[in-house]
Amino acid sequence: MKIHTMALSLGLFAAVAAAWAAGSLRGEQGKENTANPLVGSPKAIERGRANFRIACSYCHGMDARGGLRGPNLTTGHLTHGDTDGAVFRTILRGIPGTQMPANDLSEEETWELVAYVRSLQPRTPAAPLPGSVASGEKLFFGDANCSLCHMVRGKGGRLGPDLTRVGAARPLDFLVESIREPDKHLTEGLSEPNRDFPQVYEKVTATLQDGTEFTGVAFNEDSFSIQLLDQSEQLHLLLKKDLKKLVHERKSLMPAYGPDLLDEKQLQDLIAYLSTLRGI
Amino acid sequence: MKLHLTVLVALTAAFLAAPLRAQVTSERIQHALVEPQNWMTYSGTYNGQRYSLLKQVAAGNVSHLAVQWIFQTPVPGKFEATPLVVDGVMYVTGAENHAYAVDARTGRTLWHYQRALPEKLRACCGHVNRGFAMNGDKLYMATLDAHVVALHSKTGNVVWDTEAADYTKGHSFTVAPLAVKDKIIVGVSGGEFGVRGFIDAYDTETGQRAWRFYTVAGPGEPGHESWAGDSWTRGGAPAWVTGTFDPELNLIYWPTGNPSPSNDGSERGGDNLYSNSVVALDADTGKLKWHFQFTPHDLHDWDATEVPMLLDLVIGGQTRKVLAQANRNGFFYVLDRSDGKFILGKRFARQLTWAKGLDANGRPIVLKESDPTEKGVRVCPGAIGATNFMSPSYSTQTGYFYVNAREQCDLFTVERQEYQAGRAYLGSTYYPAANEKDWGALRAIDPRTGEIKWEFKHFSAPWAGTLATAGGLVFAGDIEGNLIAFDARTGKALWHFQTGSAIYASPMTFSVDGRQYVAIAAGNALLTFALPEEPGSSSPASSPAKAPAKKNP
C-alpha cells in the first residue's frame, strides 16, 4: 500500500522519522568532526548506493543529481555542511524547515550512505566555471529578460519558478537544457516555497464566453475552477463553467533561448550566475 | 441477499417505526438495506455495494445540499475512515489510533478513545485507520500497533484488547474490521516490511483468536510451491482492506496485497500465492474454499486490496452470483463467487501498458518489458494503481458499478535488498513518469459486460471512494478536496463542495429523525451535509419541485 505523498514514507525511514527526531539520536552528537570510518570502502559505497536508490532517490533523483524535491548531491558543494559528520547528521536527523526528513537508519547504514554521497563528489575541486558571474547576473536582470518571469531572493517576476536555490537544486546540464529547450522540463513537482501542491509550468489559455482570452500558467486548478496568472501577472480566478474553452499545452511559456537570443558566451555567464544561487 | 421489493418496503416501514435498538447483530447487518437510516458496517452492507435506499437527497434537490456540522479531530494525518451510524450515534476512527463517538445530528462528542502508540511504530503509509466494526454493544478497532480492541459502544471503555502480531516486525492494522456472526475479521498490513500476511478471526465476546488464514502459503499448504526457497517467510501479501460476506454461501471474500519485496521478484520465483488475490474463506473455520489471483508474481505493487463487491447479475440469460472488482492493475473482473471461476475481465484504465490482455482463465498476458529495471521502466498504471483502497459502489437503479479511477504512470526501478525484520523491504522504488500530468475519472461500468457507460474526468488522480443512493445519485471525492454529487445515470456533476483538503475516504449516508445526511472525511475533519430544513418543519424539503424556502437574512 504505498501512498503518493509517499515520498515521505518511502524507503527505510518509514513513518518513524518524527518519533526519531524527538527521541534519542543514537549518539550522533559530537560526530560533526568525525571522519567516515567506511570512507572509500567499495563495499560500503555499493551498499550506500543500493540504500540511496530505495530511500533517497525519490526526492534526490536516481543518480543523485536532483529530483522532485531534493537538491543535486554531486556538485562538490553540500549546502548543509560538507564534512562527513555534517552529512551523517543531515541524513539521520534531516533538515528542519526543509522537506529533508529524519531517517531511521543504523549508524553503519548512515556511514554507507555518506560513503556513497562522497563517492559522487568531483575528485578534484571543480574548475571554476568559464563564465562571468557578474555578467550573468546583469543578463538575468537585464537584456536576457529572465527576471521578468523568474524571481531570485524576492526580485523578479512570478510567472516562472523561483530560482533562489536553483544552483543547489539542479545540475549544470539541466540548467543549460532548461534555457535552450524549456519545453523539455516543465518543472513538475519542483519544490516551491509556500506551495503544497505540484506546480506545473505549462501554457494554459482560458477563453471567456465573450471571446476574451487569457494565457498564462495555472497557480492552481481543479475540476471546477482555475487560478490563472496571465503573462502580465494578472491573476484570474475563474470558474470552468463560465469558460468557453480551456486549453492546456504541454509546453513552456518561456521562449527557447537558442544561440540567436543567447550566444555561447552569454549562456556561460548566465550559468555561472545561476550556479551561485544556493538559497537564502 | 436479495429481498423481494414488497417485503423490503414492509420491513423498512417496520424498522423505521421501531424504537431505538442498541444491539447490532450479524443478522441485522445482513438486512442492513431495510434500515437505511443506519450504516452498520464498513461498506454499508455485507455485499460491499455501498448503496443506500435513502432518497431524500435526490438528483432534483442535491444542489441545495449544505454542511450541517463539521467534526474536527485534533490529529494530523490522513483521515480515511468510513463512520458507522447506529440509532443516531456516529462511531468513527481517526489517525494515530484515535476513535470517537459523536451525536450524529449535531456532531457533539460523546466519548473519545486512543490506544497510546509505541514510539517506534512500523507503518508504511500514514498512521491511518478506516473504521470500526460493530456487534452487540461493542465496537471493534484494529490498531496501528497490531492489536484488536473491543470498546463498549456507550462509553468507549475497553472491553478486551488482543495483540494480534508483533508491531516491531512491521505488522500493523489500518483495516476496518468486519463483524460476521460471532467473529471479528481483520487483515494485517505490512507488505512494505516483508511480513507474512494473514487474515484473523476473533471471538466477539472474549477476543480469543478463532482462526488465522496465512495469505502466504507455508510448507505443506497448497500454493507453497509458488514461492522459491524461503521467500515465503517474508512474502508480504497483506490484507488491509475490508472484505465482504455472503451469508448464504457462508463465505468471506477478502482481498490481499502485493508480494514482498514489491519491485524485486528475483528471490521469490513463482506465482506467490495468495498475494494479489481474493480468497474465499469459510466464515466459521477460515478454511480456504477457493482463490483467484489477479496479478501473479507481481513486480509493481498492485495490491488487490480493493473491495470485492458481491452482485447477483443476469449474464447470458442466467442469474449468476458474482464477485466484481476493479483492480489496481487496471482490469475490471467478474468472478463466480461460488467457485472463483473467471467470468469476464476488461480493462477500465485508459492507460495500461503491462499486459496484452487476460487469457480465458483471467490470467494476465504479461509483457516482459514492463519488469522493473535498474534504470527504470515506465509502466501504466503506476504503483498506486488504476484505483486503490477507496470504495467502489453499485446502484441497483442503474445497474452500474462506480469506481474512481486513476490515470498515472510510474518509472519502476529494481534493487536487491536484504531482508531485516521490521525494516522496509521494497526492492527499490518508483517515480512519477516525467512530464506527464496525472488525471483520473469517475467511471460507471456495466458489470455484465465490463463496458464503461460514462465517465467524469477528474483534474488529478483521485484517492476518494464512492457512494450510490436511491436518490439517483453517486457521490465521489477528488484529491483537490471536492465532494461531488453525480447523476447516477448520466454522470453529470450536479453539486460539489470544496472541503478544504484532499479526500482520502469514501462517503456514506444515514438519517436521523427522517433527515438524510451524507458524510465524508477530508483533511482532519469529518463533514456532514443535508438539505436545508424548511421553516416550521422537522423534515427538509424532499421534493425536487419544492425548492427550500428562502430564509430571512
Image: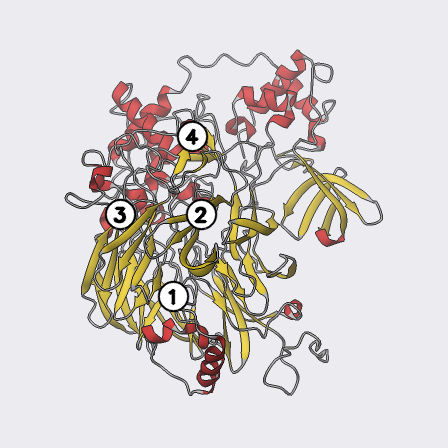
For the N terminus of chain B, the image quarter is bottom left
Residue underneath mark 3: B170
Residue B314, can we see it? yes
* Quarter of the rendering containing residue B183: bottom left
Secondary structure beneath disc 1? loop
Instruction: Name the residue: 19% across, 71% down.
Output: B206
Q: Are discs 2 and 3 less than 8 Å apart at CB?
A: no
Q: Are marks 2 and 3 on the same chain?
A: yes
Image coords of residue B82 (percent x, y): 43, 63
* Residues at discs 3 and 4 in contact (Cβ within 8 Å): no
Q: How far apart in space, not on screen, are marks 1 and 2 (Cα)?
A: 23 Å
Query: Real-space Cα distance between discs 2 and 3?
Result: 36 Å
Mark sitting earlier along the chain (3/4): 3
**Which structural element holds mark 2?**
strand
Residue drawn 22% across and 45% down? B217
Q: Which residue is mark 2?
A: B344
Amino acid type, mark 1: Tyr
Q: For mark 1, does the 10 Å Cα neighbourhood hold few (<14), some (14 to 19), or many (20 or more) residues?
A: many
In the foreground, A122 or B154: B154
First along the sequence among labels 1 and 4: 1
